[in-house]
Image: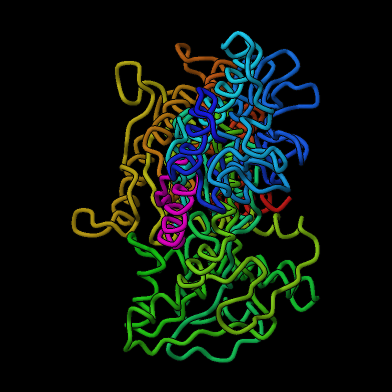
Amino acid sequence: MGRHSSDGDRAGNEWSRSEKNPAARNQAGQNPAGQNPTGQNPAGRATGGFRAAGDPGRPRAESDTGRSRAASDTGRSRAASDTGRSRAASDTGRSRGASDSGGFRAASGSPRASDTGGFRPAADAGDDDFGFEHREPRTGRRSPWLWGIVALVVVAALVTGFVIWKTSTSGCGERTKVAVVSDAAMTNALSEVARQASKDSCFDFDVKTAAGADVPGLMTQGAAAPDLWVADSQVQARRVTTQVRRELDLVSPSIASTPAVVVGSDVPELQTWVDVMKLPNLRTGSPIDTSTGDAPIIGALAAVDAGELTNEKFTEAMTVLAVQQNNARLQNDSEGARLNLADREGVPVVTTEQQYQQFVRTHPGSELKSSVPESGTVTLDYPLVNTAATARQEVAAEAGAALVAALDSETGRKALADAGYRDPEGNGVGEPVKRLQLGDPASVDKALRQWQVLGVPIRSLVVQDTSGSMAAAAGGATRAELLIEASKTGLKLFPNNTQIGGWAFSVDKGGNGQDWVEMAPIKRLDAPSGRGTHREALAEAVEDGLSDLGGGTGLYDTTLAAFKKVQDTYDPNYSNSVIVMTDGQNDDPNSITLDELLAELKRLEDPARPVLVLTIGISDDADTEALAKIAEATGGTTYVAKDAADIRTVFVDAIQARVAAAGR
């Protein structure tokens, strides 16, 4: 620095080394904090970085008053905030010093110090130190004010060097772990992009697969909840956040897309999704786990909007499809399992274009073909959702923005395209497809609520009253005999994958102050049991239980115990419920009260493990007011079978009442 060696020269050389040191500077295009989408730098907002220089032609380390512009009017570094902390750091402790365009910049609109080999002297300053003319001191010692300037520059160099280190991707100071859960089909591609996003930011992304049915439980784990979730569609995201009673917080409405398709070896021409619903041996996913399970319903709703299908026919078609799917659905059901079944047996399958392409890529001999109904199709749009606990929501939002930026980069788009995904607008992979245009969004939500009741398999504990009043006459038979008949008829109607267990109750039925006794455990109806299936074993258990009548009605204790049983053994892949059937009112003198029961049901309520209580009154003697309150407390429904004919069809009527309620 000039011809004279001094402490100031050494300080200038230290700056130069810090600028030349690759560990002290970010690579172009990297943003350590994953922040500042506007490209501004909080450490030097007006100039885009720490301004080491003043006006051209004068010493750039010098302000108009002869003081370093690196210092504030109070004598503090301009890189520091009013609280004495570095303004290059965000409130969360991560570096905000770099813009999206290339790390820490020395000055806006002028060559960076690194471009000139270090701290740059002023253009007209010649070889003089820091642009000042050299004066020979009369005393043979340097002037005190010159040493003051030197000290300020040394401080500025040290502070700025620290900021450069702080904001480099290899020296973030503190790195933040970010937990991301993803739809299974998206995990591999997302993990690849997340690794690059981690390198380019101060976030360490950890991507794991989570089935759609498991996400509600994950979101209600408090501080252990995942920070971000890639759902397979906004429909799924709305459904889950509604269930766990959280606002839907979208970081991005869509990071990729793929259309729903029908795959098979011999799929006929399809005009609408109603034609798809009628295909023999059709296989779809469960709507609780994948949005491909919703595709036929949303597609058929377009026919309702067009006046080609009545609402009654639409509900009937949903009911038929639900029974068909739940009878055919296996325990190890997945997109891959269904595609393997289609490849092996030729059955038609509703899946996504992305999953189909992945399958044929890994199964070269496959003869599967994909098609889309002439009327159009629906698209899975893969939103990125902020699911973090309250204390981490701001951090998750910043991390999400960094991940979205990586996904939107050339490398990110290529990774998604290589995995078979289209961009959010539907471009980039495969032939253009026609998207269905639906009218009223409310009608879509209504249809999907009904489909949830019908399409999601049932897991229920049926609790039947075996008190003495069930021996009362009803149309030539007893109430108990009619209920046995209704139970056997209902068991024939439930699909194979339905899980049902049975309890009988009165007062002290189970002895020692316990009002209930188990007749059969909760199992799939097609599960082996004894010499037959659980369906057959349950029918025998119901007949045995309703043949042993007597005692009072221990309604409240039994209802609470049944609720706890189902909640404690909750299965997220099912709609979990308790069905209470009684012809009387609680008359157990040692029982909890109705108010205590309702309060306890509310206290035990868990959005991640919802359990509905459906109540069925047998005859006008039933306490319909109490039954209605019990059902309402859990979001269930109530139904009253007033005469013998109603009792015979009680199961069918109760399910229809549930479907109708969901559609309101």
Q: Which image quadrant for residue 42?
A: top right
Q: In which quarter of the image is residue 81?
A: top right
Q: Residue at x 75, y 22 (%)?
A: 66
Q: Magenta stretch: give its range.
A: 184-211
For image coordinates 55% across by 66% down, the residue present is: 410
Q: Specify whether residue 581 is in view.
A: no
Spot occupied by residue 379 in the image (x, y as percentages of width and height): 62, 68
> Within the magenta stretch, is there residue 222?
no
Is residue 161 something that shows in the picture? yes
Front residue of this view, candidates 63 and 646:
63
For residue 227, above or below residue 432 = above
Tag count in the figure?
0
What x and y, as percent, mark residue 503? 37, 37
Viewport quadrant of the N terminus: top right
Instruction: From this view, report whether residue 62 is shown above or below residue 495.
Output: above
**Left or right, residue 396 beside residue 263:** right
Please state which of residues 39 and 455 is positioned toward the viewer in this rendering: 39
Q: Would residue 635 be found to the left or right of residue 216 on screen?
A: right
For this orientation, the residue located farthest to the left is 531
The x, y position of residue 446, in whole percent, is 70, 55
Q: Is residue 193 magenta?
A: yes
> Quarter-wise, where is residue 84 in the image?
top right
In this rendered view, identify the residue nearer to me: 391 or 59: 59
How far across and how far down the image is residue 256, in percent? 58, 64
Q: Which residue is painted at 49% across and 34% down in the image?
A: 13
Question: Image check: 9 left or right of 298?
Answer: left
Of residue 245 and residue 9, the one placed in the foreground of this image is: 9
